[in-house]
Amino acid sequence: QVQLVESGGGLVQAGGSLRLSCSASRRIVNAYRIGWYRRAPGKQRELVATIERWGSPNYADSVKGRFTVSADNDKNTVSLQMNSLRPEDTAVYYCNLKPNSAIDYWGRGTPVNVST
């Protein structure tokens, strides 16, 4: 069983920054996809930013230009740098790893709360 452990969430004022990290218990190099999703209160989980095996990073339109996803294959971690945070970014953020197209692993999530 693969474990994904997120860290870095918390409370921040609008306009501030946070950096989320996800540590995987297995190698992430050559993963089909790895990245971040979020679930805001009362809403469905949505994609935030992912790294595909053979493509460029993929971002939700709402975070383009503000968030940056990156992976460290040596440390088996994926990070999400979040700048210019807005109250609508408030959500629980989940790390996701797809070793191949048929398997999904999820972390337990880390909460991000952006105050006005």
Image (tube, rainbow, N blue to C red):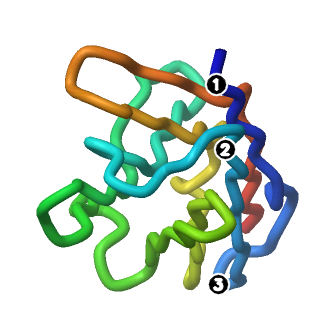
Mark 1 element type: loop
Residue 102: where, in percent of width, then height? 25, 15
Question: Mark 3 packing: few (<14 Cα in 10 Å), some, or many (20+)?
Answer: some
Residue 80, by quadrant, is: bottom right
- For mark 3, what is the residue? 15
Residue 109: where, in percent of width, then height? 71, 34
Question: Pointers 3 and 1 in contact (CB under 8 A)?
Answer: no
Mark 3 element type: loop
Mark 2 element type: strand
Nearest to the observer: residue 23 or residue 111: 23
The three-letter code of the residue at mark 1 reads: Val
What is the distance, in whole Å, between disc 2 and disc 1 at their CAs?
7 Å
Residue 63: where, in percent of width, then height? 36, 67
Q: Residue at x 26, y 68 (%)?
A: 57
Instruction: Indicate left or right for 68 with 103 as reference.
Output: right
Residue 110, by quadrant, is: top right
- Mark 3 or 2, closer to the camera: 2
User: In the image, is residue 99 above or below residue 83?
Assistant: above
Residue 24, by quadrant, is: top right
- For mark 1, what is the residue? 2
- For mark 2, what is the residue? 24
What is the distance, in whole Å, between disc 3 and disc 2 at their CAs?
29 Å
Q: Earlier in the sequence, mark 3 or mark 1?
A: 1
Question: Pointers 2 and 1 in contact (CB under 8 A)?
Answer: yes
